[in-house]
Amino acid sequence: MGYKKGLLFGLGAITALAIVLTIMGSASADDSPLAASKERTVTVTGTGSVYAVPDIAKFSTGVVTEADTSSDAMQKNAQLMDAVVSAIKRAGIPEKDIRTGRITLEPVYNYYSQPQGSTEKPKIVGYRASNTVTVTVRDLSRVGNVIDAATNAGANKVNGVSFELSDEKSSEVYNEALIKAVSEGAKKARTIADAAGTGSLTLKSVSESGTYYPQPYYMDFAGAAEAKSAVPTTPVSPGEQKVQATVSMVYTFV
């Protein structure tokens, strides 16, 4: 009798263990890569663009001087450049937005006095000194006035103006473009799902897949120093720049 009870107990335990293993195997199968591969998804790309007016302008200006000696050329240049920088500051530009760009000193040769066929080196007839500063203007309505202040103070060299978005504005505009990109991606997914006759969509993942920040827009001011008396104020126009964001979105559907 005891033997039969033990046998029955053992068979029951084996049966229970088999049931548990069957359940575990079923759960494991549901979590397997094969089950995951049965998940139906749709992947879309959304792009958003926002146009913004630059809020920063940069330009280079400076002085080129010539003299018989290198020291005279540098001294004359320093005096004029000091006047130019002072005028820029009086026009409302803080010192932190005035950065020295390049200082050069080079000999000036007389190539035309050499006899034809001569092997002699051309003679030095003087020295040329050049000094430029890069100016950042954060109020675009004052760009023309600042340029005029520099040229009126003695600057005889003005390079093109570039218009840019500040870091703060660039980040703000990019976030707007990002919102548009996500919205466009969601609309695309919904359109695809409706066309395929599927049910509800669930967002599984979203990631940035591309960004576009505009390069500075340059405005040529060659000859501006020579033409400083032609117009009351040098005109500038920043235009607009495009900031673009792109996202990749994955949806699951039933």
Image: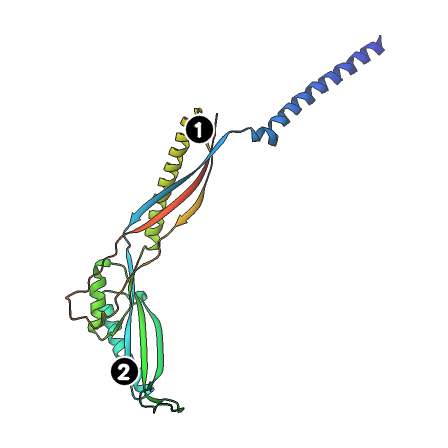
Residue 133: percent from left, percent from top:
31, 70
Query: In the figure, 186 relative to 6: above or below?
Result: below
Q: Which residue is mark 1?
A: 201
From the viewer's side, name the closer residue of 64 and 76.
64
Q: CA distance from mark 2 to mark 1?
A: 74 Å
The answer to whether marks 2 and 1 mark residues whose Cβ atoms lie closer than 8 Å is no
Q: Quadrant of the N terminus?
A: top right
Query: In the figure, 188 relative to 199: above or below?
Result: below
Mark earlier in primary sequence (2, 1): 2
Residue 74's disc is none
Which quarter of the picture shows residue 98? bottom left
Query: Seen from this angle, which residue lies furthest top?
Result: 1
Query: Mark 1 is on which residue type?
Result: Leu
Residue 212: percent from left, percent from top:
38, 50
Seen at 23% across and 57% down, the residue is 237
Q: Secondary structure at mark 1?
A: strand
Seen at 28% across and 55% down, the residue is 55
Query: In the figure, 199 relative to 218: above or below?
Result: above
Query: Mark 2 is on which residue type?
Result: Lys
Residue 210: percent from left, percent from top:
43, 47
From the viewer's side, name the closer residue of 171 and 105.
105
Tally of numbered discs: 2
User: Does residue 22 appear to the left or right of 67 in the view shown?
Assistant: right
Q: Secondary structure at mark 2?
A: helix
Residue 120: percent from left, percent from top:
39, 91
From the viewer's side, name the closer residue of 107 and 206.
107
User: Does residue 146 appear to the left or right of 28 in the view shown?
Assistant: left
Seen at 28% across and 81% down, the residue is 65
Which quarter of the picture shows residue 74? bottom left
Residue 76's disc is 2
Seen at 81% across and 13% down, the residue is 7
The residue carrying pointer 2 sits among few (fewer than 14), some (14 to 19) or many (20 or more) residues within 10 Å by Cα, namely some
